[in-house]
Amino acid sequence: HEGSIEAVAGEGITKGCNPPFNDAFCPDASITRGQMAAFLRRALEGTLPEGDPIAFVDTAGSIFSDDIAWLSSTGITKGCNPPANTMFCPRDNVTRGQMAAFLVRALSYTDDGGGDLFVDDDDSIFETDVDKLANAGVTSGCSPPVSDRFCPTSNVTRGQMAAFLHRALG
């Protein structure tokens, strides 16, 4: 993912993983929902209409609270505890399925390419989002070279997040 990491760093989408120095990226580390909110805000702020943010009960005091508020004001996130959706869960890791939903909402992908593009997401609430993300060319799955699996319940690494964003943003 080195090329994607360099690209998103060059765009100011990432600042690194070791503040205050931020001279490392930690590509194999899982990304939290709070970190993901910051990545998406830096990548997309100013490109999406904003409304009233959801008042999540678990984001006060998070260094990502402003990023999370922005994410909810754009409709990219609905929360982490459906159907109430009163929480965002900023410290939880982002799964690949959740990432698909975030990017599909953010970038308004609609074409699922006929659906059922992967063999391991049939029971996932994110199957339609995964298919839309794959059809848009943002992912080819998690099992190269066959690429018949998406791994929707696996955590997204920082390197994968950089690759998703780099492909999605062109």
Image: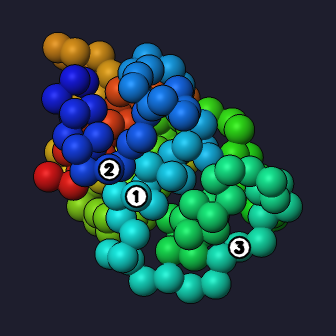
Depth check: give the residue in front, 87 or 140.
Answer: 87
Q: Which label number is shown at residue 109? A: none
Q: Secondary structure at mark 3?
A: loop
Quadrant (top left, top right, bottom left, bottom right) of the N terminus: top left
In this orientation, does residue 90 appear? yes
Image location of residue 158, percent across then percent down:
43, 29
Among numbered discs 2 and 1, the one appearing first in the sequence:
2
For disc 3, the marked residue is: 54
Under mark 2, the amino acid is Gly
Up/down of 37 relative to 4, above or below: below
For disc 2, the marked residue is: 12
Q: Residues within 10 Å of mark 3 (few under 14, many from 20)?
A: many
For disc 1, the marked residue is: 42
Depth check: give the residue in front, 105 or 161.
Answer: 161
Question: Which residue is located at x 51 percent, y 52 percent?
Answer: 38
In this orientation, does residue 17 appear? no
Up/down of 155 relative to 13, above or below: above
- How far apart in space, not on screen, are marks 2 and 1 (Cα)? 7 Å
Question: Which residue is located at x 45 percent, y 26 percent?
Answer: 157
Under mark 1, the amino acid is Arg
Image location of residue 97, percent across then percent down:
49, 40
Q: Secondary structure at mark 1?
A: helix
Under mark 3, the amino acid is Ile
The quarter of the displayed image where residue 107 is located: bottom left
**Image side of residue 116 versus residue 94, left or right:** left
**Image side of residue 26 versus residue 145, left or right:** right
Among numbered discs 2 and 3, the one appearing first in the sequence:
2
Question: Which residue is located at x 40 percent, y 58 percent?
Answer: 42
